[in-house]
Amino acid sequence: MFFSVTLFNALSIVTAAIYFCSASLIAFNIIRNQSIGNPRAWFLTSAIIAIGLHILLVTYSISIHRAIPNDLFNMLSLVFLLISVLFCFSAMSQSIETLALIVFPFSAIAVLLNVGNQAALGATATYEGAVQLHILLSILSYSLLTVAAFQAIMLSIQEKQLHNRQPGPLINALPPLQLMEKLLFQSLLAGVLLLTLALGTGFVFLDDLFAQHLAHKSILSVIAWLVFSTLIWGRHYLGWRGQKAVKFTYVGYVALMLAYFGSKFVLQLVLQQS
């Protein structure tokens, strides 16, 4: 696949604009305190168009690298593409469109960060198939657990407003509390399973964690795995829910975010290393 840099940048801006428009459709209906069901077809259509263009952009980056791109901005774009795809598939069968208010603006920002990112579009190291598998599992697990973090944010807002007996337009637009909790733990369970596989392949395929500047990433990833696993155990055996589940999700996600993107931020933007 061949894009000029100018075309790539233009498509990035168009993709981000459509993401913002999709989120705006939801925001407009919440502000008007109307049902989200009426513009559902318009919302899903714009979301599919944005995701389709996003796929083209990510495919181009992968074709240029001849591997999954491993720089900060391209990785963010790939992660939020997967998050958007997962969200869109879920929105087709369940009324969770309100989550687009968080998912799509972040996806748009991730796309815009690659505008003019010519350095990231250059040659990159070629990884072995086993390492590619580890990277793919890591991205999938991070994407699912990011969705869980977004759901935890909305669940926290929903629960607090219901407890304060001050339901507003946002609460009326959200799915029932029980469904939100069910979706949260479904995302957590799938994400932890993939994170387990990612950690397993990482320890098998990466020879020297300290030489490869991966010690802190591995430690933080294990901490995140322990936090999420404890939450799932507590949910099953102790009935944990509500704000306890939200707080555990926040702690686990912060550790995971630092593991996945903290090192990339420091190495690429602070120390100017690849």
Image (cartoon, rainbow, N blue to C red):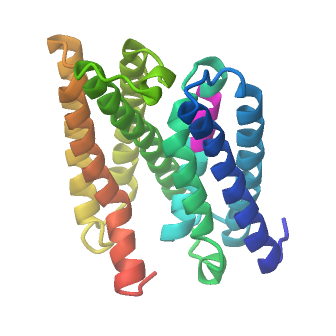
Depth check: 209 or 269 in front?
269
Give me the residue at 17% from left, 28% from top. 244
Q: Residue 161, relative to residue 136: is it above or below?
A: above
Q: Return the residue nearer the eye: 67 or 82.
A: 82
Q: Is residue 93 left or right of residue 9?
A: left
Q: In this view, does 132 lie to the left or right of 170?
A: right
For the point 27% across and 51% down, the residue is 254
Front residue of this view, candidates 96 and 126:
96
Is 106 left or right of 171, judged from the image as shown? right
| Residue 176 image offset from top left, x and y in percent | 43, 14
One can see residue 152 in this view: yes
Q: Does the magenta stretch include residue 215?
A: no
Residue stretch in magenta: 84-90
Q: Nearer the viewer, residue 215 or 77?
A: 77
Residue 186, image quadrant: top left
- Residue lying at the far left of the rendered structure: 238
> Which residue is painted at 25% across and 27% down in the image?
160
- Percent across and percent down for residue 106 are 52, 53
Question: Which quarter of the image is occupied by the N terminus?
Answer: bottom right
Residue at image location 63% in from the left, 39% down from the top = 85
Residue 32 picture location, percent across and down: 58, 31
| Main SS class of the magenta portion in the image | helix
